Image (tube, rainbow, N blue to C red):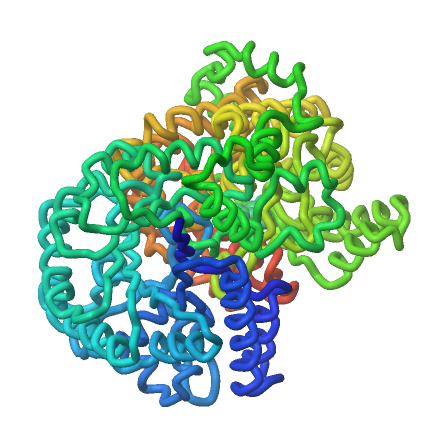
Amino acid sequence: MRTAVIGFPRIGRNRELKFASEKYFRGEISEKELLEVADAIKKESLLKQKEAGITYISSNDFSFYDNVLDTAVLFNVIPKRYRELKLSALDTYFAMARGYQGEKGNVKALAMKKWFNTNYHYLVPEIEDDTEIRLVGNKPIEEFEAAGRMGVNTKTAITGPFTFLKLARFTGSRTVDDVADALINAYVELVKALERKGEGMIEFDEPGLCTDLTPADIELFKGIYNVILDNKGSVKILLQTYFGDIRDIYDEVIGLRFDAIGLDFVEGSKTAELVKRFPKDKILFAGLVNGKNIWRNDYSKTLAILKNLSTDEVVLGTSCSLLHVPYTLEGETDLSEDSKAHFSFAYEKLSELKELGELFGTDFEKDERFIRNKLLHAGRKNYEDSAVQAAVAAIKPEDYERLPKFEEREKLQKKKLGLPLFPTTTIGSFPQTADVRKNRLEFKKGLRSKEEYTEFNKNKIRECIKLQEEIGLDVIVHGEFERNDMVEYFGENLSGFLFTKNAWVQSYGTRCVKPAIIWGDVARKKPITVEWSKFAKSCTDKPVKGMLTGPVTILNWSFPREDISIKESTLQIALAIRDEVLDLEKNGIDIIQIDEAALREKLPLRKADWYSGYLDWAIPAFRLVHSKVKPETQIHTHMCYSEFTDIIPAIDAMDADVITFEASRSDLLILDALRENNFKTEVGPGVYDIHSPRVPSVEEIVTALTKMREKIEDSKLWVNPDCGLKTRGEEETVKSLKNLVAAAKIIRGQA
Ligand code: GLN
Ligand code: ZN
């Protein structure tokens, strides 16, 4: 059976591209040296896939930053502000990705957004009124030819025109209709250019088809591909979809003259149903090897699905690009062989494709590879915790409800805490300076004793609190000096998690994350944050806010189990965090923040599934964490990185007492949504952007607060930055927070 890979990781096995790019940004290496690193990565990926005997290997899946950005640049969708800088092609590209500040000017980067339901982020193309869309680049051609020189005959993968148009932002008066023809022509040009070079197949990536589509979307899609398919010449066109199924447009898709159609069997809940009507004259690229999670494929399931397909021409492939999984298990020496046997990263997934391809159509039941896989799926070691399972089974409806009602609690809390109007606070972390990281690292490596490590952190906490008192903040935090990462820190202190050494996954540009693996049932072994918070409280008379990560975020930023539902796993985590909440309360912490930065991450792509498929259990899981605290204990939550306007009622239903969130970059649009929905929870929309080193002026913050007061009652408004301060420098942080407190005081004078 033939096999296919949609796309491969590209940051480098040891994040070589990340480090080389960062050096290039700092001016430490030349463009040529950066290109050499990129070439080596591309070569290694192609070779690995070739060795595994993959039939359809992609080229053009490499990117220096992001494939949507590559596509924009390829078709001249380069806003004027970048063209005017008159930089080299590569530097213009990076200016679009990261902004530019230097002798030639000062421009912001393109907006960055979450790539569908993943933790990867793409750059949002901007189409201006004078953008002249046409083929101006040759990256796809170069990559096809370079692969050819290595003896690898690739298919060219490219972001499809439909998805590109759906993701693009129109900054002037033009609309999709005004540019569609030019864009279609540009794609046709590309198809022809590739045909001239001998390309056999082009893969148009169209994950946009897995979202809710309107009749106009469907017309747009048909309009685009009618022209492209009319002009494809001898090139075969593969329409590749992923991250769900294409139920809204399946009939139209199979009615067009595509040579091949790629469908996602992993996340597409309706795919199996839809392919019953797959046309005989097309090749089905069946996405059965999960491109997003790291568990070994279940061969008997996959082979059964393949066997039941009624179509003749089937290619076995990945469900989406392997970009979303780490490179390889090789070198993960800290994981036991027992557990490693259950995992499969990108390299290992290639072997799975190969094995499955070889097994299919044979008498595989007797094949040793099949038997080994079957045994593997029959059981895992040391993952069950019957006490946890029983605790989840015993959760009662009332465990999800906090009493008394919010309005009553609000009164009690105001009385107990005695905070001024417009209370000021921060989101938790303070600058993670070099000494802070050194302390953690040396402790981890055993170079520093527990006592030295603790002593260092306590000094840091003491200083941090003194600083906050001097600045005049009302609700104090301890600063999170003990945490590397808001999920890893909790995972390390809970049973059921495994950690890798090198399993990095690209999140955006040069930024990678190393998700934990949820291996088994999750339980809290001992108190996690209590000592730090207790110590912080002993340093001040002001209220100290305890700081935890919520269950939905812990789950969403880990590789989840596949043997139980993510709901079940989240509830287990929720019970563990609940114990921590209650311990903090017992130790006199009156305000507890439970961060849900990634609450929206696994929100289904289709609106119809939002509640039934996700929010209906995710929101209660959060409530479970705080439902047992006293009415006077104030529960905060914090969210960032995404749009909330459309799920405001769900956020209110988390029933926290206060929520802080990122708002400064979204032009405060969210305020209207809060008002329209009669949002009851007290709110702290961030008054300045912490992603930039810029210090906001007092006036600027006063202006932001004044706008907020138009939409939010004075008694409900908090004053805080957008997010945690850990990536910021100390100096700018102190200046910014002083201005924040000064602004709050001015506003108090006006109330
Ligand atoms: N409490 C965390 C911090 O301040 C929150 C981080 C986040 O929202 N991403 O760093
Ligand atoms: Zn945040």
Above or below: residue 367 compared with residue 628 = below
Q: Could you say where residue 561 lies in the image, as x and y percent from the top left?
A: 55, 33
Q: Could you say where residue 599 lies in the image, as x and y percent from the top left?
A: 45, 38
Residue 603: image quadrant is top left
| Residue at (47% x, 14% y) in the render | 404
- In front of the other: 361 or 491: 361
Tell me, yes or no, if residue 529 can be seen here.
Answer: no
Tell me, yes or no, if residue 11 can be seen here.
Answer: yes
Q: Could you say where residue 68 lies in the image, as x and y percent from the top left?
A: 34, 65
Q: Could you say where residue 40 lies in the image, as x and y percent from the top left?
A: 56, 75
Tell me if 667 is positioned left or right of 720 in this view. Answer: left
- In front of the other: 664 or 527: 527
| Residue at (47% x, 35% y) in the render | 363
Above or below: residue 203 compared with residue 104 = above
Q: Quadrant of the C terminus?
A: top left
Tell me if 609 is positioned left or right of 749 in this view. Answer: left
Q: How many marks?
A: 0
Residue 709: image quadrant is top left
Tell me if 547 is positioned left or right of 68 in this view. Answer: right
| Residue at (28% x, 60% y) in the render | 204
